[in-house]
Amino acid sequence: MTKHGFFDHQEQLKELAKPIISILNGSNDIYSNQSAKRMPEDRFTARYYPSDDNDTIVEGKKLACDILIFISMMETDAKCTVIMGKLKEEVRKAMKALGLGQSVA
């Protein structure tokens, strides 16, 4: 949805990022009973043992990271656009002050 412009304001992107960041928190991971039979009782170490659940969780976390990277790129692009706009305006003012009538694209 972010790639298609549903979230285009920086504040919206920050709000979108919060739940995605919580996905990366390993304490929220839930393992099925089937994989729990093959792993130790301790749920904190269960994630270190190979299982289909772990593969699914890791894939989900990878997707969350990809989304966060994309959000970060969008925020950086927006900041660069603002900075370039200000620079362009300052160049126009300087050229006008110097009496140079050329426009800056």
Image: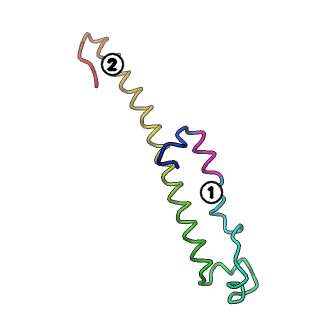
Q: Amino acid at mark 1?
A: Ile
Residue bearing the label numbered 1: 21
Q: Quadrant of the C terminus?
A: top left
Residue 76, image x, y percentages: 46, 43
Helix, strand, or loop for circle 2?
helix
**Which mark is first along the chain, 2 or 1?**
1
| Residue 14 colored in magenta in the image | yes
Residue at image location 60% in from the left, 51% down from the top:
17
Q: Amino acid at mark 2?
A: Arg
Crowd around label 1: few <14 · some 14–19 · many ≥20 (10 Å): some
In which quadrant of the rendered view does residue 14 lie?
top right
- The one of 9 and 5 positioned closer to us in this rendering: 5
Residue 12, image x, y percentages: 60, 41
Crowd around label 2: few <14 · some 14–19 · many ≥20 (10 Å): some
Residue bearing the label numbered 2: 92
Residue 93, image x, y percentages: 35, 16
Q: Name the magenta segment's main secondary structure.
A: helix
| In the displayed structure image, the side of residue 40 where residue 5 appears, left or right | left
Helix, strand, or loop for circle 1?
helix
Counting every numbered tag in the picture gives 2
Q: Specify start and end residues of the magenta stretch as a single range.
A: 11-18
Relative to residue 26, is residue 102 depicted above or below? above
Residue at image location 62% in from the left, 78% down from the top:
53
Residue at image location 53% in from the left, 60% down from the top:
65
- The one of 101 and 68 positioned closer to us in this rendering: 68
